[in-house]
Image (cartoon, rainbow, N blue to C red):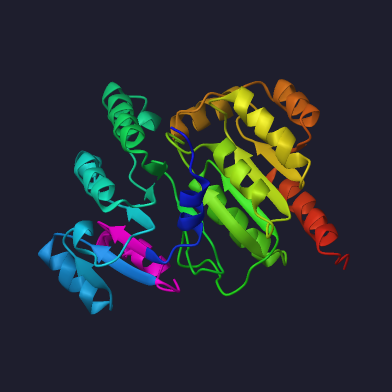
Amino acid sequence: MKVDFTKIDKAFNPRCVAVIGDRKLGEFMWLQGQSTFHGKLYSVHVNLKAIEEIKALGFTNYTSILDIPEPVDLAILCVPRAVVPQILDECIRKDVAVVHMFTAGFSETETQEGIEAEHLLKEKAEAANLHIIGPNCMGIYNPKAGIRQRPEQPVGVSGALGIISQSGGLAVGLSLEANVQGININKSVSFGNGTLLDSADFLEYFAQDPEIKVVAMYLEGVKDAERFFKVLREASLRKPVVIWKGGRTAAGSFAIASHTGSLAVPIAIWNSVVRQHGGIGVMTKEELIATVKALVALSIGDLE
């Protein structure tokens, strides 16, 4: 599938967002998280009890994304895996720019059923040129637009840092820690399994974004190493790219494989290749934050 960066830009700077299948069990995390969004926000749900609860929170609900009376730039899917194909069909008919799939249960499970479900998902999306973030991820955080991965993330500020993370938990954690350290986020993305849009796609997009001066990445592995390192070389000529690689031990490599289904490589080889292509390798979250803090200060001319 040819990546359309116009669609990706619509996802990071949407005018209309639809949250599909949010649940009270999760305290309507995705609707509450986007309550600060500056554009139009809609819920899509078919459960009558959930609809009443969603309306009580002040959100407009439709029983199908096809009924939303305007184009949808970003759809956030919280539905069970079994109904994903039906929902994607409707998103394709609606011509949604990008779908963020919080839904899990795909290749990261390392089961035949999960792997096959992800393969079918990829086939359907590629045939329709539907851009998907995920599955099994926390999606987008853009504080200036009011789009969040978690309700506790700050909004109303915008800085120089872009974050790209395979891990949703680390994407959220890094954004909160950076904020404590006085580093404002410009944009962040958690891409999970990276079935359609992977690390190289987001790095290429961030490299072209003039508002992002420094890129921080947490990666557990890459699926297309040749393309990733080509993009890294080009991106590092424009701005610093700091990369924290997970899975440095055998146990760690197993853990990350269970999380995203990505393959890992020995850390010594990884660090060498990253350095050769202009990236800055770090070994811990603390080192990542410290390095990014210094680079952001340099990029904006603030050395305090």
Using the image, determine if residue 107 lies above or below residue 85. above
Magenta highlight range: 17-39
Q: Is residue 279 left or right of residue 8?
A: right
Q: x, y (%) of residue 294?
A: 82, 56
Residue 26: which quarter of the image?
bottom left
| Residue placed most toward the observer, 266 or 295 | 295
Classify residue 210 as left or right of residue 56. Answer: right
Name the residue: 49% across, 48% down. 168
Q: In x, y percent, where is residue 206? A: 63, 49
Residue at 28% from the left image edge and 25% from the top image edge: 116
| Residue extending furthest toward the right | 303
Residue furthest left in the image: 48
Residue at left offset 56%, top offset 26%: 253
**Relative to 87, 290 lies left or right:** right
| Res 283 seen here | no
Q: Report whether residue 130 is seen.
A: yes
Q: Quadrant of residue 244?
A: top right
Q: Residue 131: where, in percent of width, then height?
A: 40, 43
Asked if the stretch drawn in magenta spans residue 185, the answer is no
Based on the picture, tell me whether residue 25 belongs to the magenta stretch: yes
Q: Above or below — where is 282 with respect to 8?
A: above
Quarter of the image with the N terminus is top left
Residue 122 image-quadrant placement: top left
The relative height of residue 151 versus residue 255 in the rendered view (above or below) is below
Q: Residue 231 in the image: x percent, y percent?
A: 66, 34
58, above or below 3, in the image: below
Q: Nearer the viewer, residue 114 or 228?
A: 228
- At x 54%, y 55%, the residue is 172
Quarter placement of the C terminus: bottom right
